[in-house]
Image (tube, rainbow, N blue to C red):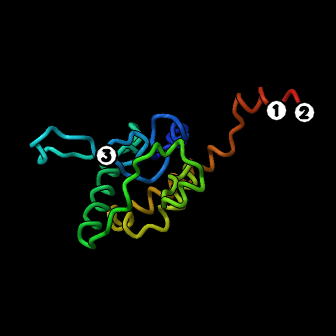
Amino acid sequence: MCCQWVNSYKRLIPGYEAPVYVSWGRHNRSSLVRVPMYKPRKGASTRIEFRAPDPACNPYLAFAVVLAAGLRGIEKGYELPPEAEDNIYEMTDSERRAAGIGQLPSNLDEALREMEDSELVAEALGEYVFEWFLRNKRAEWDEYRAQVTPFELAKYLPTL
């Protein structure tokens, strides 16, 4: 719900500003969820930064799902995984796997497949919006995949 467009995923490239890996950390700018430092004796001012949403997402849908996920975690007592203290982009694939750090979907198709299997998203959005969203985004993905871009023409046409 946070990356709702085909172009949302063009910013999710390892090593750049947007987070790509599922992790949290206090001082770690490569984490998906960041807990910035607060001023001494101001613990009540602690906040989190959820760094995945594309600025073009529908904030109502994204916030509904994020809030539902947070409430589910509280209600069911989910435990946080260990904090990611190292720069995740500098870790090898095997180091990330050993640390239990997964990766976000790399395109809209992968994200829609994840969403289709999510009971939480279906409950948060309701059946009508959930089905409508999936249907429309599948059509958008299919239309996108069928396009021949100027990049492809410039890159491949001369070699044919």
Mark 3 residue element:
loop
The numbered mark, 2 or 3, whose residue comes first in the sequence reads 3
| Front one among 84 and 160 | 84
Mark 1 touching mark 2, by CB under 8 A? yes
Q: CA distance from mark 2 to mark 3?
A: 51 Å
Q: Is residue 44 left or right of residue 114?
A: left
The label number, if any, that marks residue 57 in the structure image: none
Residue that carries the numbered disc 1 in the rendered image:
156
Identify the residue shown where x is 53% and y is 37%. Answer: 15
Circle 2 or circle 3, nearest the eye:
3
Which residue does the image show at 53% across and 54% down from the upper left? 96
Question: Where residue 4 appears, x then y in whole percent?
Answer: 46, 47
Position of residue 23 measured from the top left corner of the image (x, y, whole percent): 41, 53
128 and 33: which is toward the camera: 33
Residue 118 in the figure: left or right of residue 71: right
How many discs appear?
3
* Residues packed near mark 1 inside 10 Å, few (<14), some (14 to 19) or many (20 plus): few
* Amino acid of disc 1: Tyr
Residue of label 3: 26
| Disc 3 packing (10 Å; few <14; some 14–19; many ≥20) | some
Return the mark for residue 160.
2
Residue type at mark 3 is Arg
The amino acid beneath tag 2 is Leu
